[in-house]
Image (cartoon, rainbow, N blue to C red):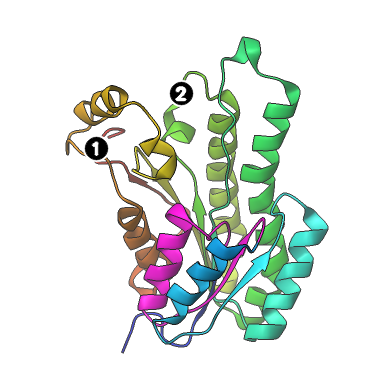
């Protein structure tokens, strides 16, 4: 029997990148997948078909994760369509990097809203569903820069550090209902975004990593599967770094 047979997972920001890898990994272990992205375009529809190829139910929903009302509306739609939500992966995120002296208020507000407020929005929206079920696993996507900070990423670092605070608090608040909440802190993960960096910059990053390579979206997805499944039934309130040792 597959690890997530009969379970329903909601993954935010999953049309591409790490979110897509997570959705595919959970589907490969039997989970039905509801996923969100800002727009359900051709790329998102292609992702939906890839998920469905595992023989599970899948549907993409257009949703602005930073909008409170929009989030509650889409969670209600997903609950009606799928009947339950066993797993929530708060993955939606953006970057608007820059030195503090040049960072605008709009850059700060946008990153905090999409990265941090979205976790509040979706966690609050799924709480009644998981509360009623008496079970659930929430996995929040933080970052190693949320643990150690990073120059020119004050907004991103703050949002990811905030996610860790939310994670630990939710774990303590939801634990009595058998609902677990953990965070993953990826390091240098090779995605479309990091592939745009100059090769010498990538090589410099990799040289600082004890495993001497960047991570893959699948590396993050594998840890998400562990936290989403009953393999981690006694794990909650934790932050697991997936960074090849760079933030050991």
Residue 185 as seen in the image, left or right of residue 37: left
> Whole-percent x and y of residue 219?
30, 54
In depth, the one of 203 and 182 nearer the eye is 203
> Whole-percent x and y of residue 54?
39, 82
Q: What residue is shown with label 1?
A: 245
In depth, the one of 96 and 129 nearer the eye is 96
Q: In the rendered structure, which segment of residues is drawn in magenta? A: 11-39
Numbered label attached to residue 183: none
Element type where label 2 sits in the image? loop
Residue at the location (82% across, 59% down)? 69
As drawn, 29 above or below 11: below
For the image shown, how many numbered marks are present on the structure?
2
Instruction: Say which quadrant the C terminus sits in.
Output: top left
Element type where label 1 sits in the image? loop
Instruction: Say which quadrant the N terminus sits in.
Output: bottom left
Compare marks 2 and 1 and give the one earlier in the sequence.
Answer: 2
Would you say residue 135 is visible in this rendering?
yes
Would you say residue 235 is visible in this rendering?
no
Q: In the image as oriented, which residue stretches furthest toward the left?
A: 211
Residue 217 as seen in the image, left or right of residue 20: left
The image quadrant of residue 51 is bottom left
The image quadrant of residue 243 is top left
The image quadrant of residue 134 is bottom right
What is the distance, in whole Å, between disc 2 and disc 1 at their CAs?
A: 17 Å
Residue at the location (60% across, 47% down)? 166
Numbered label attached to residue 150: 2
Q: In the image as oriented, which residue stretches furthest toward the right?
A: 69
In depth, the one of 73 and 204 nearer the eye is 204
> Whole-percent x and y of residue 204?
25, 23
Q: In the image as oriented, which residue stretches furthest toward the front?
A: 42
Whether residue 18 appears in magenta in the rendering, the answer is yes
> Whole-percent x and y of residue 117?
69, 46
């Amino acid at each position: 029997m597959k690890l997530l047979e009969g379970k329903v997972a909601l993954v935010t920001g999953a049309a591409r990148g790490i979110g897509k890898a997570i959705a595919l990994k959970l589907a490969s272990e039997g989970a039905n997948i509801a996923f969100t992205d800002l727009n359900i375009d051709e790329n998102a529809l292609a992702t939906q078909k890839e998920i469905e190829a595992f023989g599970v139910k899948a549907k993409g929903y257009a949703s602005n994760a930073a909008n409170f009302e929009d989030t509650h509306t889409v969670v209600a739609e997903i609950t009606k369509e799928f009947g339950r939500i066993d797993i929530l992966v708060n993955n939606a995120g953006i970057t608007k990097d820059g030195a503090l002296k040049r960072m605008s208020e709009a850059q700060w507000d946008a990153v905090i809203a999409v990265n941090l407020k979205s976790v509040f929005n979706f966690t609050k929206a799924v709480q009644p569903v998981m509360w009623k079920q008496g079970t659930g696993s929430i996995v929040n996507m933080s970052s190693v820069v949320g643990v150690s900070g990073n120059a020119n990423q004050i907004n991103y670092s703050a949002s990811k550090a905030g996610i860790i605070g939310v994670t630990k608090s939710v774990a303590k608040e939801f634990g009595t209902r058998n609902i677990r909440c953990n965070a993953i802190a990826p390091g240098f993960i090779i995605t479309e975004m990091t592939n745009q960096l100059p090769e010498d910059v990538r090589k410099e990053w990799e040289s600082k990593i004890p495993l001497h390579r960047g991570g893959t979206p699948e590396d993050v997805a594998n840890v998400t599967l562990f936290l989403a499944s009953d393999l981690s039934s006694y794990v909650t309130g934790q932050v697991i770094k997936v960074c090849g040792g760079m933030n050991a």
